[in-house]
Amino acid sequence: MNFLRNHWFDIGIILGIICGIYLYFVHGQISALQELMWISLITLFAHQVEEYRYPGYFPGNINKVMFKSNQPDRYPLNTHSALIINVVIGWGFYLLAALFIDKAPWLGLATILISVGNTFFHIVVCNMKGRTFYNPGVITSLFLFIPVSYLFFDIIIRNNILSPLDWAIGIILGIALNFGGILWLVIFMKDKNTKSIFAQRFLIPPTQ
């Protein structure tokens, strides 16, 4: 379990490559929207690598900058809550969207709203709070999340894919996942005495 807590984002690199290979072989055989949802999943893997691997100090940044923590290596975000939020919620819903987008397009909308929420959080909220121009997650938000989100809305609006009910379910679920599946879980799983501690490399560099 400790291996997963410390290396789930590295596993994401391998899964991203596998998804890319899969897309190469099914290109033209699945719908454009489904193909975009697989790409969206790959962008999530890449985003998490920027946050947790290189430069990788997102945990320390969110704990110290956003929550003013005096224990940025473990509170409120710790390695266990990061695993649950990113793998169970993140990978789970993005994968479901890729698999079932044609039957449940509201799933795609919900996950795209997670990407949009992440983009706003990294580019606006984190940078304003930390008085910075960069934090881990900004690059993939700008160059991956934003283009994929634009293409998603272009496809569904131009082709009138979502019904009013799909829009309602997708928006409600997207908001719920952004706040309940991410922010609320960070707070709910906080534990100052946790043994699920981030290593030094996950904390904000002294020069920041």
Image (tube, grey):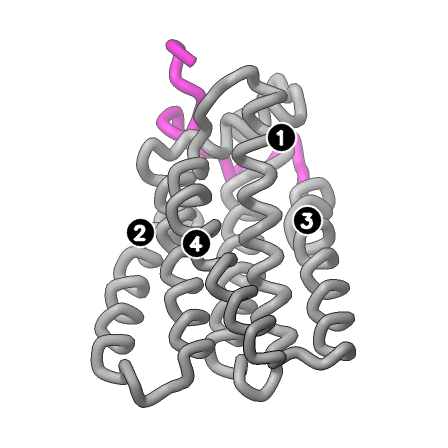
Question: Quarter holding the C terminus?
Answer: top left
In the displayed structure, 12 sits above or below 136; it is below
Q: Going 56% across and 79% down the picture, which residue do you hit?
A: 159
Decide: few, some or many residues near mark 2? Use Cα within 10 Å; few <14, some 14-19, many ≥20: some
User: Mark 2 belongs to which amino acid?
Assistant: Asp
- How far is the residue under mark 4 from the one under mark 2? 24 Å
Tag 1 secondary structure: helix
Nearest to the eye among marks 4 and 1: give it: 4
Is residue 28 toward the left or the right of residue 192 in the image? left
Nearest to the eye among marks 1 and 3: give it: 1
Name the residue beneath numbered marker 1. Answer: 125
Name the residue beneath numbered marker 2. Answer: 10
Compare marks 4 and 1 and give the one earlier in the sequence.
1
- How far is the residue under mark 1 from the one under mark 3? 19 Å
Where residue 98 sits in the image (x, y, percent)?
47, 75
Per the image, is 193 magenta? Answer: yes
Compare marks 2 and 3 and give the one earlier in the sequence.
2
Name the residue beneath numbered marker 4. Answer: 147
Name the residue beneath numbered marker 3. Answer: 185
In the displayed structure, 134 sits above or below 177; it is above
Q: Nearer the viewer, residue 127 or 73?
A: 127
- How far is the residue under mark 4 from the one under mark 1? 20 Å
Where residue 93 sits in the image (x, y, percent)?
56, 68
Start-end of magenta stretch: 190-208
Compare marks 3 and 4 and give the one earlier in the sequence.
4
